Amino acid sequence: MDLLVYLANGALVIAYFLADRAPHLASLAIALVICVTFDRMAQRQAVFAPSRYGPEAVKASRMPRTAQAITVGALALWLLATWSYRSLVPLIGALMWAGGLTALLVMPQQRWSLLWSTKAYLILYSLAVLAFRFYLLQTTLLSPEQLADVFGGAEPAARVLAQNTGTFATIGSWLLWVILPAGFFGLLLQNWLAQPMSLVGPLQGAQEVLATLRTRGNGDQIPGS
């Protein structure tokens, strides 16, 4: 009976952890897929050039890891900003990561520009989260007594501090919950409306990613070669 209780408690701890960290784990999985597929394709294309005497592509230099490093950096910054966050922000971030991956799959014409713009927007969003959390931390460290000399007493200082904190907290919440995510998905929608979907192979992007995952990038053909 004790063994069953220990097993049940262990299973519940794991289940609660996975449920609590589901947005972060989903973002981690999506970033890993981008890192081993689209980043690898972009890096291989960057160091390959058309052959002078044939259609084959020849390797120009050692393949860089710049695109993968940016993805890892964006993910690390995102996890740092939201790991201890208990609000809608981790879920919104996971949806942004998923939206970026979906855009890369269905918009091959914009793939390399979207590969940068989506990660840059996620970095910007992570910095906004860190700035908002730093502001909230600073407001908790301030006391009315410290501002009494500035505002002419502890009571006026407490009133001004509460009003400003509430105003900035509301603005920050709207910025993180609505404005920045709406701008990100608006960017994806604008790119989707500007480029027609491929009529020949609308699922070609997904098939290319699956082939890259199966072969682990070995022997990939360079897009456009």
Image: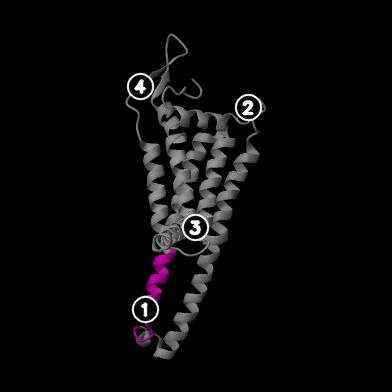
Left or right: residue 171 versus residue 64 is right
Helix, strand or loop at label 3? It is helix
The amino acid on which the numbered mark 4 sits, given as a three-letter code, is Ala
Q: Earlier in the sequence, mark 2 or mark 1?
A: 1
**Residue contact at pointers 4 and 2, CB within 8 angstroms:** no
**Cα distance, mark 3 to mark 4?**
46 Å
Nearer the camera: disc 1 or disc 3: 3
Front in this rendered view, residue 27 or 188: 27
In the rendered image, residue 125, in percent from the top left (x then y), is placed at 47, 55
Q: Earlier in the sequence, mark 1 or mark 4?
A: 4
**Residue contact at pointers 2 and 1, CB within 8 angstroms:** no
Q: Residues within 10 Å of mark 4 (few under 14, many from 20)?
A: few
Q: Which residue carries the number 4 mark?
A: 60
Q: Earlier in the sequence, mark 4 or mark 2?
A: 4
Residue at the outermost front position: 1
Q: Which residue carries the number 1 mark?
A: 142
Helix, strand or loop at label 4? It is loop
In the rendered image, residue 111, in percent from the top left (x then y), is placed at 52, 35
Left or right: residue 180 versus residue 43 is right
Q: Which mark is residue 201?
A: 2
Q: Which residue carries the number 3 mark?
A: 19
The amino acid on which the numbered mark 2 sits, given as a three-letter code, is Gly
Q: Main secondary structure of the magenta part?
A: helix
Q: Earlier in the sequence, mark 1 or mark 3?
A: 3
**Cα distance, mark 2 to mark 3?**
37 Å
**Residue contact at pointers 1 and 3, CB within 8 angstroms:** no
**Residue contact at pointers 1 and 4, CB within 8 angstroms:** no
The amino acid on which the numbered mark 1 sits, given as a three-letter code, is Leu
**Residue contact at pointers 3 and 4, CB within 8 angstroms:** no
* Residue stretch in magenta: 132-146
**Cα distance, mark 1 to mark 3?**
35 Å
